[in-house]
Amino acid sequence: MRALRRLAYSTLGLAYALIVFGAIVRISGSGMGCGDHWPRCYGSWFPPLDQPTLVIEWTHRLLAAITVAMVSALVALAFAKRSESGVSGRGGVLRAASLAGCLIIVQALLGMVTVRMGNSAAATVAHLLNGALLLAALAATVLRTGGLGGRLTDRATPMRSRASRGSAAAAAIALATVLFGGLTAKIPGANSACTGFPLCSGSLLPALPAQHVQFTHRLLAFLLFLHVLGLMIGFTRRREAPVVLRAVRIAFALICLQLVIAAAMVSLQLPPALRSLHEADGVAIWLSLFTLAWLARFTPVPGAPDQSKASEREPLPRGASPAHSMAVIVARGAIS
């Protein structure tokens, strides 16, 4: 399992770098840096790197090819170790890795569609959405190997339903915020439609369509800030598991950093290279909140019985007398 965990961590890090580099492609306008050719660049696998947009797009495609190879290796290793405990079956590593394998193929195909459609906004956002889902599948793979605070179990404890619903809602809001951020970067004029921060050109109700897109992105970000703040306060008061508290605090810190970066982007007119930090942190927020939702669902409440271990115990024999049943329960408690 250790080898699987290490490979899953490496693949997740590489996929994250791929998504962030895709943001650099969008921000720098390099989406058509290789023309309308795919997968080759102007008909060549190794084109002359004499134009900045070509270098950026070609590097992005190279990262994508390496990521495909890494995900394929992860699926192959999980399949080779399918006989080990926690790898195959429901909740196993193999299922999560296989899902990532399917999503990386879809990601490559969407990359082709994006190029063939002239880097349109719809294709770009679909490409970004699938990339976010790919990250989630790889994060689930890491969690199922016991990384990121995860546990080698697939059974949710019923006592976590309230926390898991709130965390899942936060992850959904984060994903919508990331997608609207990608839409803001692609729709002409939307990126610079709102001057000032936090209001849009000094107005709470923007009038122009381009302003609506960017201001919706901002509203989602503020909603996410308030929601995660509420989760953090509630989790602290209820004394949730340390791993859950750590995850929500990390997510909240990333959200605070994101608001600072957003304010700096509007106020200081940061160059494209620094503006990509906004996308990088946004994707990190999505990843952290997906991890939080997972941990909130599968981590037992402190002091509560571990349902995953209880489910592994053999049932009491049918027809057993009350005295015999009580003796078995006491014996199990002494052993555990």
Image: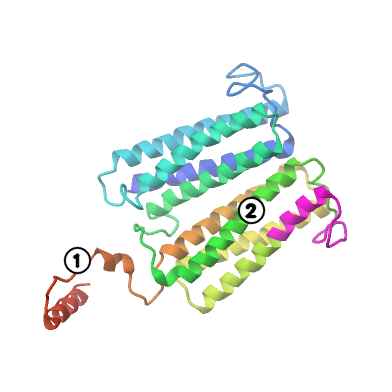
At which x and y percent is residue 202? 88, 60
Could you say whether the residue bearing mark 1 is in a helix, strand or loop? loop
Q: Quadrant of residue 320?
A: bottom left
Q: Nearer the viewer, residue 132 or 278?
A: 132
Q: Which residue is mark 2?
A: 176
Magenta part of the chain: 197-220
Between the C-alphas of marks 1 and 2, the distance is: 44 Å
Q: Residue at x 72, y 42 (%)?
A: 273
Q: Residue at x 39, y 64 (%)?
A: 156
Which kind of residue does numbered mark 2 sit on?
A: Ala
At which x and y percent is residue 72? 42, 35
Q: Which mark is residue 31?
A: none
Residue at the top extreme of this rendering? 43
Determine contact: label 1, label 2, CB under 8 Å.
Answer: no
Residue 67 visible to an observer of this rendering: no
Q: Residue at x 66, y 31 (%)?
A: 56
At which x and y percent is residue 120? 70, 34
- Image quarter (top left, top right, bottom left or bottom right) of the C terminus: bottom left
Could you say whether the residue bearing mark 2 is in a helix, strand or loop? helix
Q: Which residue is mark 1?
A: 314
Which kind of residue does numbered mark 1 sit on?
A: Glu
